[in-house]
Image (tube, grey):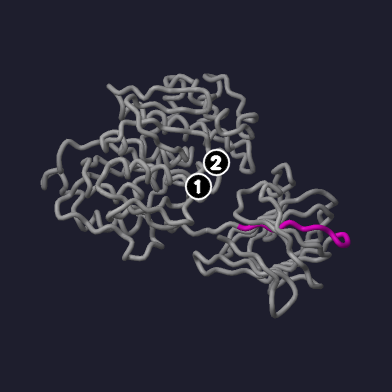
Amino acid sequence: MINIQTLSNQLGIEIADPATKGRFEIHTPTAVSPTQVETAELSFPVEKAVEVRTSTVTLPKNRGLFVRTSGGEFVFESAEKDRKHLPDDEYILEMGGVSVKLYISISSSITVRRRSNGINLGLDGQRNVVIGARSQHQTAPGTITVTDDAEDVMRALSFFGSSLKTTSPERAFSTLRGSPPLIQHGDEFHVPSNIERPSTGVKLVLPPKREFLYPATSLAYYLGTTIEPGKEPRLIVGDSEYELDRRRYETTVERTLQQVFLLDCVARTEGLYPVCLYERELIEPRVELDFARLFDAPLADRLTAYLDVPFRAIEPAISSWNFSADVVPSVKSDEVLPLLANDLALVRIAESPVSTAKTEAANPERLEAFYRTSSPELPESNVPDLPVNPVFEIEKKNPCRNERTGVGRSGVSVRR
């Protein structure tokens, strides 16, 4: 969790990220007392926000500073010139190239001066300044212990969404989805106190068997769902229920994930990154969705609107998914689920351990590389041991076809 406190050796505040051991200072001309405020004060997802009152803000590193109005309209980037005067308005400033993701909200005219040792922001007198930050770490928040019982795996999957940094459509950006908790086996079920189940109001009801749990791994993570045992698989969103056809279960789950992800990619263009998206041009005439309204809608309302669209209407805009894995439903496979979820893999059930011939392209060396690179900051002791016999087959596809929506860039992370 981000810490923000007064500097002890000079005037200003320090923002520290214990997860990455990164820190960043903001200097002020007089002493300030940061007061914690709601993170909603900033338009961007942040973990913590404070308010200080000052006439000047000095950022002691000359990095990229991106300025937008509070409505998201891009105004200025500090690399463009050494001095810039911005008229009185409400601004959101984004600091790039530092160890934490930093945002500053200011309602004032601003004179931006870029110097060799940093950036100075001169305000129109004493103003309230809101400063927010979020961690850029991609490490897992901890490890959930499960027994060999499939119901424990189901309980663990309910905590995967704890790492989501937002439930807005911008969670389609991979940087706004943290790595889910790891899984290890032990004598009893245990969840560390720092891992909290998200409150999204979205629920999966599944038979407590690995054959049903594994394919739902990425969907549960992306939607931040809780999972409850039940005879017939279904997704519950508020007062609406969606059957996950038992006869075509894997296909139905895959299509649900693809549909929600794609429509999030389209809806996020109504936010702070209003890019022209090819897929939006392709599907907007085929659906009756108000993406501007959906961007700000509650999660349940947005999902219901998405899922009421027939899949055939958006299918032409869905490119091949980057990453799929055929997994044998067994105790030894449980520990790879967080790594698959982290890349939004389409998980399918393999009938039996794949043969040596079939896994020639997915040999233990390549599997080990996959484990290591899926979460590069994870200490090696937290990486699951490779099984003696391969229990799943990996297929990663060329991401080029998906670059338009961000699947493979801003969406599914493809690491080479």
Q: Is residue 77 visible?
A: no
Magenta-drawn stretch contains 128 = yes
Give the quarter of the figure containing the N terminus. bottom right
Q: Is residue 95 visible?
A: yes
- Which span of residues is magenta-colored? 124-133
Where is residue 29, by image quadrant?
Answer: bottom right
Question: What residue type is disc 1 on?
Answer: Leu
- Helix, strand, or loop for circle 2? loop
Relative height, residue 397 to residue 287 (above, below): below
Question: In the rendered structure, does residue 312 fall within the stretch colored magenta?
Answer: no
- Are the two marked residues, 2 and 1, in contact with CB atoms closer than 8 angstroms? yes
Residue matched to label 1: 164
Q: Residue furthest right?
A: 125
Quadrant assignment, res 168? top right
Closest to the observer: 101 or 380?
380
List x then y, in percent, for residue 315.
42, 25
Residues packed near mark 1 inside 10 Å, few (<14), some (14 to 19) or many (20 plus): many
**In the rendered view, would you say 362 is above or below 288?**
below
Identify the residue position indicated by label 2 in the image: 167
Q: Position of residue 339 (x, y in %)?
A: 35, 50
Q: CA distance from mark 2 to mark 1?
A: 7 Å
User: Which label number is shown at residue 195?
Assistant: none
Q: SS of the residue at dot 1?
A: loop
Left or right of 233? Residue 173 is: right
